[in-house]
Amino acid sequence: MRIIKESLVKIKKQGLNILLIAYWFMLIYIVAGFAWWFISLEQQNKQMYQFRYAELKRDEPYFVEKVEALQDARRRKTLQYIGEGGTFFLVILIGAFFVYRAARRALRLSQQQQNFMMAVTHELKTPIAVVRLNLETLLRRQLELAQQKRLLNNTLEEANRLNTLTNNILTVSQLETGAYHLNMQELNISELGENCVHAFQKRFSHRIVETHIEEDIFVKGEYQLLEMLLNNLLDNARKYSAEKTLISFSITQSERNVHIEVADEGNGIPDTEKKNIFNKFYRVGNEDTRSSKGTGLGLYLCNKIVEDHKGRIFIKDNEPIGAIFVVLIPKV
Ligand code: ADP
């Protein structure tokens, strides 16, 4: 299966390479044709000048003025070619640039969609397989209580993963199509933050989360979306940092805004990737270098949720290592 997939990707890549070569060939051909056109016209201009000059007689009246008029006409023609040709050339280059950019975008999106489909298939199949296996084991064998508990916890964890994934996918599509009915109400984000960290600690008791949450900060928002936002950020901090490192979570306020910060001590995010990771399906690196599984939807969704709350999300570097996701949302 994997081999077939790889061969399909290879064939697609080859096809795209051929298209790219054809594109550059056409462009070079047009530019060369253009240069040739300019040179021929210029030669014609010169010949015309020489022809007219040859027709003049040195002893005829106003010889010098006539030569000057011929030279002037020749210069004007050259300028006309440069002006018209230059404009035309510029239009072609701008057109080629837009075509190239649109094609590159479409290509990137299609590659990311393909990665997304592969990731989703994997992310859906793995938890289902684990849940099935655990339940079958529990049904068939008489296990000790501790073992039963371990299997059940593991099953619950996989079910939670499935739940997050399907929620993310559904919410993204609902937000994009406008089908999500935003039920904005005044809510206590401090309590929501406490709840999210609490649930997170229950699921990942081995992770150390340092919290700093100022009490009773209110925002106008949609409870479920803000919960998804915080859960996604906490989950990323966990996924992209080592087990023994610290995760910091804070909710504070300034005069106008609520500041939510989720910091980790993972590898952080390179400056060149900071603007990309909020794009749909975008994941840093490629399928061979990535160790963690995911779909590239989480941060896209976070960004959408923050936008719907008239806020802003951005990344800072943690010191000495790691990433800090900062969310600013207007206070009530
Ligand atoms: P996913 O985690 O499913 O890949 P996200 O949209 O949540 O998708 O994240 C997009 C990419 O941003 C991730 O693939 C990862 O490379 C990077 N990323 C997100 N959060 C962090 C983080 N806390 N530290 C380092 N990289 C991160």
Image: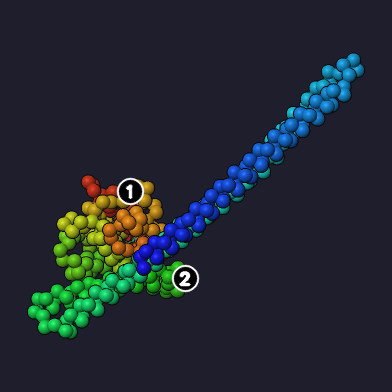
Nearer to the camera, 210 or 185: 210
Instruction: Classify mark 2: helix, strand or loop.
Output: helix
The residue shown at (16%, 57%) is 244
User: Which is more N-terminal, label 1 or label 2?
Assistant: 2
Instruction: Classify mark 1: helix, strand or loop.
Output: loop
Crowdedness near tag 2: few (<14), some (14–19) or many (≥20) residues, C-alpha within 10 Å: few
Q: Is residue 199 visible?
A: yes
Coordinates of residue 13 in the picture (x, y in percent): 46, 56
**Quadrant in which the N terminus is drawn:** bottom left
Q: Is residue 86 visible?
A: no
**Kind of residue at disc 2:** Thr
Q: Which mark is residue 270?
A: 1
Question: Is 41 placed left or right of 1 in the picture?
Answer: right
Question: Is 127 placed left or right of 24 in the picture?
Answer: left
**Kind of residue at disc 1:** Pro
Residue lying at the far top of the rendered structure: 59
Coordinates of residue 156 in the picture (x, y in percent): 22, 75
Coordinates of residue 90 in the picture (x, y in percent): 62, 43
Nearer to the camera, 304 or 147: 147
**Quadrant in which the C terminus is drawn:** bottom left
The residue shown at (36%, 51%) is 274
Residue 309 higher or lower than 52, as above or below? below
Q: Mark 2 — residue?
A: 177
Residue 47 higher or lower than 206, as above or below? above
Q: How is the image coloured?
A: rainbow
Q: Is mark 1 within 8 Å of ligand 1?
A: no
The residue shown at (42%, 74%) is 181
Question: Which quadrant of the render holds ligand 1?
Answer: bottom left
Coordinates of residue 101 in the picture (x, y in percent): 52, 52
Tag nearer the camera, 2 or 1: 1
